[in-house]
Image (cartoon, helix red, strand yellow):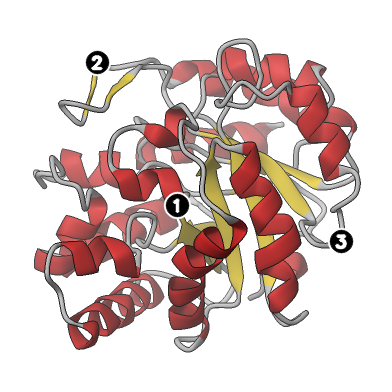
Amino acid sequence: MRLLEKLTAQRPIILDGGLATTLEQAGCNLNSSLWSSEVLRHQPNKIQQAHSAFTEAGADIILTSTYQASYDTFSDIGLEIEEIEQLFSTAVDEVNKATYDNQVVVGSLGPYGSYLSDGSEYTGNYEQTQEDYYHFHKARIDALISRGINDFVFETVPNFSEIKAIAEYIIPRYSNTQTFWLSVTVDEQGDLSDGTAFETLCEYMTHHSQTLPIFGINCSTVEGINQAMNKGLKDLSQTIALYPNGGAHYDAETKQWENEGDSSQIIDQLPSWIEQGVRIVGGCCQTTPEDIKAIKTLLIEK
């Protein structure tokens, strides 16, 4: 099933949760520049098991295990092009094994900051040319399209220059066959992680509703998301998608979360977000299949 078709359902749509968190719970070591892609290389069956756990929990949308899987990332560790191509095939094969026809598989595209592997997806402290951003994203978008993926989310994007490159320079080079969704990170004040006022971003997004019909926030705290909702997010014409993290701080040096967080905040906030028109809900880092099951239960009861 395609993403826009799924959105015709007269109910909120449930996204999966933290793939990396679920893999860590299964005993996988993600302390690597490749993050979950390390597991994709060496333990692909664990990827399928994690996807399956979210399917069983009731997720309507499952993201591919390609957040960190850029050609640049893999080339930097010495992989040849044939090996990189095989990893994309493996990622798609594993998610297809774990999903059903009534679910949507969406290609996960981490930002340029995730390639830097220094926590930049939470600071936005980088800047490239539009051409640089295009070449970074193009190779894996094309790899996923050739393997049957046509719905995509640029997620955890912290940087206004990358957002503008995505909306103005990258997406227009693809056909209407593909659907693209943008998800950004915000700070505790609800502003874009690079410091751009969220009101400025919302004004920009009003001009790109056709290019980016789905927009929202991920891997940010519930409090930061609430601030952004009040700064204009809830008033946009796009379908709004929210998938917070558990509220902890990420240490880029140790590649570890500094505390456990509290994913119950997401469940507590969910009714208010649904009342404000949010259509896609789920979790990011520090959320598990159990959290997605709790979201599913709450929405059924509601």
Q: Under tag 3, what secondary structure?
A: loop
Q: Mark 3 or 2 closer to N-term?
A: 3
Q: Position of residue 186 (x, y in %)?
A: 58, 25
Residue 110: image tag: 1
- Residue that appears at 45% across and 86% down: 147
Query: Mark 3 sits on what residue?
Result: 210
Quadrant including the C terminus:
top right
* Residue type beneath disc 1: Gly
* Residue type beneath disc 3: Gln
Q: Under tag 1, what secondary structure?
A: loop
Residue 189: image tag: none
Question: Relative to 263, does residue 291 appear above or below in the rendering?
Answer: below
Q: In screen coordinates, is 278 left or right of 252?
A: right
Disc 2/disc 1 C-alpha distance (Å): 22 Å
Alpha-carbon neighbours of circle 3 within 10 Å: few (<14), some, or many (≥20)?
few
Q: Position of residue 75 (x, y in %)?
A: 22, 69
* Residue type beneath disc 2: Glu
Please tell me which residue lies in front, 158 or 150.
158
- Residue that appears at 29% across and 83% down: 85
Q: In screen coordinates, is 25 left or right of 296?
A: left
Please tell me which residue lies in front, 208 or 238.
208
- Residue that appears at 33% across and 53% down: 53
